[in-house]
Amino acid sequence: MGRLCAAVLLCASVPAPAQQLPLMPWPAQVSVGQGTLRIGTDFSISIAGAGAGDARVKAAALRTMMRLARQTGLPLPAALPKTEEAMLNIVIEKPDHKPPQRLGDDESYALSIASDRIRLSSDGPLGVLRGLETFLQLVTPCLGDQPGFCAPAVEIHDNPRFPWRGLSLDVSRHFIPVEGIKRTIDGLAAVKLNVLHWHLSDDQGFRVESKKFPKLQQLGSDGWYYTQAEIRDVVAYARDRGVRVVPEFDVPGHSTSWLAAYPNLASKPGTYQIVHDKGDPAGVIDPTRESTYKFLDGLFGEMAKLFPDEYFHIGGDEVSAQEWTSQPKIRAFMKLHKLADPKALQAYFNKRLQKILAHYGKKMVGWDEILAPELPRSILIQSWRGTKSLAEAARQGYTGILSAGYYLDLMQSAAQHYAVDPLGGDAAKLSPEEQARVLGGEAAQWEELVTAETLDAKLWPRLAAIAERFWSPQNTTDVASMYARLDSTNRWLEWLGLTQRSNLKLMRERLAGNMPVGPLNAFAAILEPVKGYERHRGPYGSATPFNHLVDAIPPESDAARMFGMAVDAYLSSPNVAAAAELRAILAAWSKAAEDVRPLLASNSLLAEDLPVADEVTKLCGISEQALDYASSGSPAGWKQNALDAIKDASRHTANLLLPFAPAVQKLVEVTR
């Protein structure tokens, strides 16, 4: 492109901040040119090429017009021109892209933006869908005196690093209505993820209508389930956006909701009910009865028709061996069939399931525990235990995907997820042939503590950082750049219709009631939920209301992270201006902790947070003293007392933590 003169080639590694584009995931190759393309009311899209008749591309082009109108406020027509002349020209080189979408379908594209025209080309429709998302991310307010919205002159050649890039979404523990599923699919497509792994059954509920076994939804769902018509609608919706839907029906463990409907499937005789609360007894399916396989054949045959994807997930994780070994008839079966232990019995069960699924044209997927040499190499292993088990599967000839390190429900930072690579750790030691069997990864959102109201905030924007790990070149690892672009992506996703920021704001307004919400917002901005499984140990169940302050804040505090960066900058080069910046932040936080007290004291849902406000005040005071003593030295005993106080303040109250405490500790530790 002659117009892209003086271009700077930016391949794989992310550019310097001055050159940075608001793109996530970062493309394989980016060449930044001079000038911009102005987006006005005359913007239009045309489609040409051998594959121009693909319905997905036309639908995506129309959605692009509507989304661009929303992003810019421009009154753009929701129609495509009848001629091939338009500002954005889409060219699909190859025809005949029939459903279903399959693993490994071509998603590469080339996007060229000049001062007067855009060209987006791809061999197939998926590349066009990915390229349109890149274009929409590039549209921002024009800089300088130029009014309106612009896109920079760029040349992008892009393709994914891994073919399997997904989200495992649990809707059993807390049901997510269809609109939430569709909104999530929109988000997946926006950041170029291509698999929705739909966890549709667990101890807490069976979430799909079965016409062959209707008691599953009648007795195993509490009335919360998707009709078959809704399933078909969601699958079609996802395909239009280039997202495959892989269903999971978890067996033989995590199946209490099945047993509530059909107790004859259980290993132990008795009456079962859906698990609602922590400590409710769970059951396991009996793998020794032929009637079990007849039932599963009927159910999986019915479900296979609903979900056209070639892969079908059977779970297979965390099976209680005691549920089997405590039963004489099961022990006798194991002895008769020379099955040495429960692991061998589960392998027997999985072999039977694999044959059932193969009969319906499906490839079996399961968690780590299903790995056994008796199973054919066509199965896919999903690793929640880590790269060691993923690598072991690859060495044995199995394909696999990584989920360990991407559990969004554990409230870890985007940086922590970003540091995990499907080909890191033990997988890095694999041969090239073995590494090729690692197909990518999936983030996982388990929903013990997540509801439809908080879903978006628990997924986004951190899921976008994980999406970059799956799509972008392996050496795209700059954390500072990731956070800068993640901030832009977070705002952009709200224009798409996600609610990760707006819903939390509304939840805090609900907590504030008739009192001003400003102090609560300022206080909440410096807090984070506890991490890992700490909160999971609480008395939570499917009927627990999640309406406390800890539920109304994002997993990561940007304010605390930026304070930590400011402290590091100050410590590397102490100066008056940097100290003054820190003092201003601390003064604002002290004021926030003081201003919010009347609201906390007046609300029964917020009273538990009063000790947290006390600790904020304490830490801010210690930080101020540390800055005072930085040059003059501290009084005898002060430093140890301050460190003890920081340790006390780091105790978790109301399931909240103070994420700026480590930075305060750094200030104290350097005092003389």
Image (cartoon, helix red, strand yellow):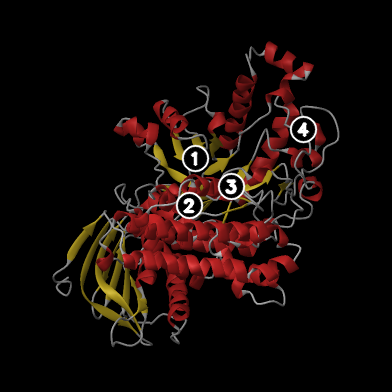
62 is higher (above) or lower (below) than 8: below
Tally of numbered discs: 4
Q: Are the two marked residues, 3 and 4, in contact with CB atoms closer than 8 angstroms?
A: no
Query: Gap between marks 3 and 2, in whole Å?
Result: 23 Å
Q: CA distance from mark 2 to mark 1?
A: 14 Å
As drawn, the label of residue 84 is: none
At x 51%, y 64%, the residue is: 186
| Residue 345 picture location, percent across and down | 64, 21
Check residue 404 in the rendering and tell me which mark sits there, or answer none: 1
Q: Nearer the viewer, mark 4 or mark 1?
A: 1
> How many angstroms separate mark 1 from mark 3 (CA)?
31 Å
Q: In terms of sequence position, does the residue under pointer 3 or pointer 2 come before the other? A: 2
Mark 3 lies on residue: 648
Q: Earlier in the sequence, mark 4 or mark 1?
A: 4
Quadrant where the image shows the N terminus: bottom left
Q: Nearer the viewer, mark 4 or mark 2?
A: 2
Residue under label 2: 413
Of residue 100 and residue 516, the one placed in the foreground of this image is: 516
**Residue at 38% from the left image edge and 69% from the top image edge:** 137
Q: Outermost residue, right direction?
A: 271
Instruction: Give the structural element (helix, strand or loop) at label 2.
Output: loop
The answer to whether any part of residue 591 appears in the image is yes
- One can see residue 197 in this view: no
Which amino acid type is shown beneath numbered disc 3? Asp
x then y, percent, for residue 480: 35, 57
Crowding at dot 4, Cα within 10 Å, few <14 / some 14-19 / many 20+, comes out as many
SS for callout 1: loop
For label 4, the residue is 265
Earlier in the chain: of badge 4 and badge 2, it is 4
